[in-house]
Each structure stands twice: as C-alpha cells, then as structure tokens.
C-alpha cells in the first residue's frame, strides 16, 4: 500500500493499525496537505455489511465539526476497491503514549485533558452520537496542545434502532461501562464511565479494572471491583477524585448526567487550584513543550494556592474542605510547617468547652483530625465497603511507593532469642527490604505484637522465622490499629509482626470501626486495602422553619421537620455533596446544597425575613 495512490491521495507511511483498519499517513496530490488515511482491512471490506458500517462511521464523523474532534475530509464510497476514510493528520501523541513517556500525570493536567474530551463528547452527544470506544488510544494531544478525540468507528446514532452492535463485539474491555459489558441498552452515561476510566488511568498510571483475560476484566467492571483512585494517587486533587469516583459508579444513575456536567466539575477543579486555562503558563502546550519544568512550576504554585484556599475555608468554618486541601499538601510535603501550624490553630479554636451538641461534635472531630494531620494523612472521599474485609494479596495493589524508610530494629524478645554474636537487625533483614509497589504514603514502623494463638494441630512457628511486614492501606484516611484491645499504632505505620493469624480493628472517632482478618507468612510483605467510612452527621433545622416543612435530600423524601429527632436530618455520607429541599405550607420552598456536611454537622439557613 505504501507508495501507491488512493484516488488523489499518496500513501506515504503506516502509522497505526487497529481491529478494523490500518492507518497511513498520506498527502493530497494537488493540495499537498498531509492527511490520515484509514483503510478497512481486506477481510472486512469484502463484506457489504461491514462496508455499510464503515459508511455510517464516515457519515457520523463528517457531521461533527468541533475543535476537539478529529475532522473527516473524504470517503472512498461503497463501490471503491479499497474502503477508506481520509481525516486530518494529527502531529502529536496518544494519551497512552504520553502516559508511557511521563508516568502518571498531575491532577491539573488530567483535568485540562478531561475538560477538552468532555466538551467533545458533549458536542457528539447533542448530535445524537455515542462514541462507545473511548480510551487513551483514541485521544491524541497535538504538538500545540490541542486535544483530539478520534475513532468513532463503532459510534452509532442514538435513534438508529435498526443498528445492533453489542458490547460483546466491539469496544475495549478495560474501558467498557458495566451496561456495555452486559450488552444492555446504552446512553450517554456509558461514555461518561469510559471517560472516568481514562481520567483514572492518567492520574494513577494504572487501569481501574484489571484481570488475566477479557472475561475477568469484564466481571470486575460489572461488579465494580477496583481500588479507590486516591489509594493509587495520594497526592492527587480530592476534587478530581470526586469527579472520577462518581463517573465510575456501577449504576448509570450514580454518574454525572452529561458530559457538560463533567466539564463543569473539572473546570471547578482547575479553579480550586488557581489554574486559568487561558493563561499560557498553564495550557497543555506548555506541558507538551517542557513537562518537567511545568510540573516543577505547578508544585510551587499549588503549595502557595492551596494554603491560601485552605485558610479561606477555615475562616468560613468549612473545616472538612480545608483539610481536603491540606491533605494534598501534606502528601506532597509531609513536613510542611505552615500547614501543621494552621491545624494546630484549628485545634486551639475548637478545644474550648462546647455548649451544645453540635459544638461538641465539631470539637471532637477537630481534635481527631489534628492527630491525622500530624501523621500526614487527611480526609478524602471514600467508597462504601463491607465492614469485615478479607486481606487482598499485595500483587493486587499496584500504586508505586516513592520511598520507604527502613524500620527501627526491634528488641530480641519481640521474636524470640537471637543467635549468639548476631545483631538483632539480622532477624529483620528479610522484612526490611524495599517494599514492592503497593500503597500511598510509605509508613514508618510501629511496635511489634504477638500473633494469635496457633490453632491446635498446627506447628508453632520457629523462633528463627523472619517477621512479616503488614501495611493497612486506607488511602488518604487514617485510623488507629488495635489488636486484642491494645493499640498498635496507626494505619500510617508499617507493622512488623511474627507470622500468624490476626484479627485487627481500625478505629477513629470520624469513621465506622472496620475489622479485618489477615494471615501473614514468614518474611512476607503484605498490603491490605481497607476502606474507611465516615460516620453519619446531621443537618439541623432552626426554629425559624415550621415543623410542617417537608424535607427531601438529593431528591428523596425524608419526612417533615417535626417528625425528626432534634429537628435534624441524618446524613449517612457527610463527605459527599447533598442537596436539601424544604417545601413549607406557609414559607414556600427553599433549597441549599453542601459540598460536604462534615463531621460537625450543619444548619439549614434560616428563611429570609418578609419584605417590609
């Protein structure tokens, strides 16, 4: 094919190949314009059905005119010997290539890319077209920083019911939505799930759903078996994590309703970070030109902006929002004295005696959060998980660990006698090697503990057996670790323990107690992922609101104010957004939205005074 001419296009070189077609770089014979020529594979073009499908692709793309969508110039037609589409040639690299080159990307770069992809999807969805195969291979970043969404090869019109193309035949398993994997009817939210997968991949460097074969991947997609995004990227923006986690909801109803909504949420992430997309310093072109310099400039910028934003939120009493920002800073620089000073000031301001129930809750929450701050971990959004969690093998957790400090040697009595003339460190050598890529931040060691009694019939472990390293990965959350009512330390630490079977409880005044069962072998380095769930909080309704007012939260009817204990609405997930609506017989309707209620609760604003 190379060196030949297709109609008026010279074929210059092969640049890629997919399941349906081969892509060549070409040039218009008279205009001398470089183009991309997508030629359907011969074994596919021999089928009239496939030619018609290819023609539908051409018609679908041809009507799309958007700066973030690959533009189509020409189409061979059904009668040509070679079936092909001619599009603009993108001088740049795919997101897959960018990820391989740079490793996981900064949150703000991911948000910038996501904004452009979301706008492209929004435009296509408004035209009645689903992409159905959104993945990092199908998004390119041009050398000038322009993002291009490509390959609508399996797109379809939403109202073209006679076209049947199921998820079992088309699409990429790791990026498929659960409904596409189950061959259920699709709508725009299927593309939003794929976009969430792309964003997850870019910010962590790992796909959310994995498996040894396509069937296992699809099973994990359908069941939602994946780590929380912050477990793999502890320094990421908490706001970006919110966007990704919502887009990856198993049920379509849990996701954003449109690509435009994701666009708006990602834009808010950039605003929170003080990034103006129109500022040349922060545009994607600057990142493409010099990624290392961009990242260094961004880190210095975030250190300044996030501290200022956290101060502002503290001044407005939004402690949880402030701590979400401080968490990111401490993940980047755990010794940031300015942030630690701010948290100490928060502790002083709330430690005075509280005069009502809400004040006591807030004070207690702040004291606990202070302890978390000093350990360098902060609150972020967590997923709901079962209370009792079986240990996962370390191979399932793939987030890289930047550095691990070697543990402090333990006394000989911790693991039995030490052979003569051999230092205690020798007994720990097998457990103090560098940790395999596993979790975010690297925990320091804690005191050793004795194992559960060995079950009858099993041999006692030999004294010379090397201890195991146990890490409880709670992402950006922290809890105290207890064994037999004895506090062993926190989830921030790595625990050097003898081989055996343990039942541990993770406790914190801000989270529900989680119990895990784990067994460790001699010399094993085991990472156990655990999801901590924030305790419920409340939204109270002052006496200014009538008892007859009917309350709804996120669209669900919760009864009237008078029927609520202490005139307060229970919020099961105070770390998530909640919209509360009041419908009052005499006072009319009022609505208020909280990004997060926080552990201390909140109060619904009083009604506006009547006009004079």
Image: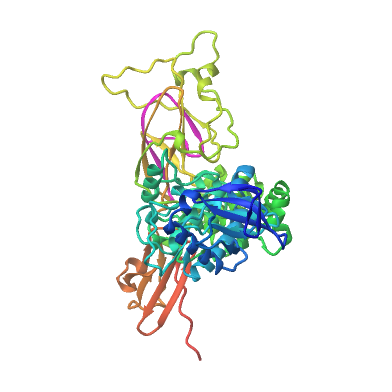
Q: Nearer the viewer, residue 467 or 270?
A: 270
Please say whether residue 17 is visible from this viewpoint.
Answer: yes
The residue drawn where x is 26% and y is 21% is 456
Q: Nearer the viewer, residue 21 or 334?
A: 21
From the top left corner, tell me how far across and down residue 220 is, in percent. 39, 46
Question: Residue drawn 34% across and 17% down?
Answer: 460
Is 328 one of the magenta-colored residues? Answer: no
Above or below, comparing residue 479 to residue 422 in the picture: below
- Residue 576 visible in the picture: no
- Magenta region: which residues? 485-510
Q: Residue 209 at x, y = what percent?
A: 44, 46
View extreme (bottom): residue? 612
Relative horizontal placement of residue 423, taking residue 274 as reference (left or right): left
Give the image location of residue 72, x and y in percent.
Answer: 59, 63
> Percent from the top left, x then y, of residue 16?
59, 47
Instruction: Find the residue positioned furthest to the left.
Output: 456
Circle count: 0
Task: Give left or right: position of 309 versus 414.
Answer: right
Is residue 194 positioned above or below 120 on the image? above
Locate residue 269: give its quadrant: bottom right
- Tell me which corner region of the image, top left, top right, bottom left or bottom right, holds residue 85: bottom right
Q: How is the image coloured?
A: rainbow
Q: Determine the main secondary structure of the stretch shown in magenta.
A: strand
- Membership of 494 in magenta stretch: yes
Say which of 451 and 356 sits in front.
451
Residue 305, located in which quarter of the rendered image?
bottom right
């Amino acid at each position: 094919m190379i060196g030949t001419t297709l109609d008026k296009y010279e074929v210059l070189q092969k640049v890629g190949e997919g399941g349906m077609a081969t892509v060549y770089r070409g040039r218009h014979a008279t205009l001398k314009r470089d183009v991309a020529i997508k030629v359907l594979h011969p074994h596919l073009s021999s089928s009239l059905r496939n030619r018609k499908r290819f023609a539908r692709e051409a018609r679908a793309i041809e009507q799309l005119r958007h700066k973030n969508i690959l533009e189509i110039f020409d189409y061979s037609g059904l009668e040509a010997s070679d079936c092909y589409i001619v599009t603009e040639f993108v001088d740049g690299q795919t997101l897959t290539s960018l990820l391989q080159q740079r490793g996981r990307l900064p949150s703000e770069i991911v948000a910038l890319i996501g904004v452009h992809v979301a706008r492209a999807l929004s435009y296509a969805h408004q035209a009645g077209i689903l992409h159905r195969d959104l993945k990092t291979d199908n998004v390119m970043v041009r050398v000038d920083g322009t993002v291009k969404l490509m390959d609508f090869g399996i797109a379809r019109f939403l109202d073209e019911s006679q076209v049947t193309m199921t998820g079992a035949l088309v699409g990429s398993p790791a990026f498929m939505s659960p409904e596409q994997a189950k061959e259920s009817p699709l709508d725009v939210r299927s593309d939003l799930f794929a976009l969430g997968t792309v964003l997850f991949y870019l910010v962590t460097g790992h796909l959310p759903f994995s498996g040894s074969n396509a069937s296992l991947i699809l099973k994990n997609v359908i069941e939602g078996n994946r780590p929380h995004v912050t477990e793999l990227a502890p320094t990421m923006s908490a706001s970006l994590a919110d966007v990704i986690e919502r887009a990856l909801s198993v049920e379509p109803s849990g996701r954003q309703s449109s690509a435009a909504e994701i666009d708006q949420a990602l834009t808010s992430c950039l605003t929170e970070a003080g990034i103006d997309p129109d500022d040349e310093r922060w545009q994607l072109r600057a990142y493409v030109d010099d990624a290392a310099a961009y990242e260094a400039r961004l880190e210095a910028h975030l250190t300044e902006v996030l501290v200022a934003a956290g101060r502002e939120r503290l001044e407005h009493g939004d402690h949880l929002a402030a701590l979400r920002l401080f968490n990111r800073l401490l993940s980047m620089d755990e010794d940031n004295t300015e942030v630690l000073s701010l948290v100490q000031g928060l502790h002083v301001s709330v430690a005075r005696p509280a005069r009502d129930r809400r004040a006591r809750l807030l004070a207690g929450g702040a004291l606990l959060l202070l302890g978390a701050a000093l350990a360098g971990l902060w609150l972020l959004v967590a997923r709901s998980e079962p209370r009792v969690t079986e240990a996962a093998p370390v191979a399932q957790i793939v987030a890289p660990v930047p550095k691990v400090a070697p543990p402090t040697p333990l006394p000989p009595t911790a693991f039995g006698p030490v052979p003569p003339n051999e230092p205690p460190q020798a007994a720990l050598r097998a457990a103090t090697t560098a940790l395999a890529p596993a979790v975010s931040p690297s925990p320091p060691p804690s005191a050793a503990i004795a194992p559960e009694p060995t079950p009858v019939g099993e041999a006692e472990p030999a004294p010379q057996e090397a201890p195991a390293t146990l890490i409880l990965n709670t992402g950006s959350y922290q809890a105290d670790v207890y064994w037999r009512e004895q506090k062993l330390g926190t989830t921030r630490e790595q625990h050097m323990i003898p081989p055996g079977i343990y039942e541990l409880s993770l406790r914190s005044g801000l989270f529900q107690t989680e119990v895990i069962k784990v067994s460790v072998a001699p010399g094993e380095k085991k990472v156990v992922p655990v999801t901590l769930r924030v305790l419920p909080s409340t939204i109270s309704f002052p006496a200014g609101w009538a008892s007859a007012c009917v309350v709804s939260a996120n669209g669900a009817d919760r009864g009237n104010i008078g029927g609520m204990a202490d005139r307060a609405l229970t919020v099961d997930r105070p770390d998530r957004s909640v919209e509360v609506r009041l419908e009052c017989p005499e006072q009319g309707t009022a609505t208020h939205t909280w990004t997060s209620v926080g552990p201390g609760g909140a109060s619904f604003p009083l009604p506006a005074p009547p006009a004079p």
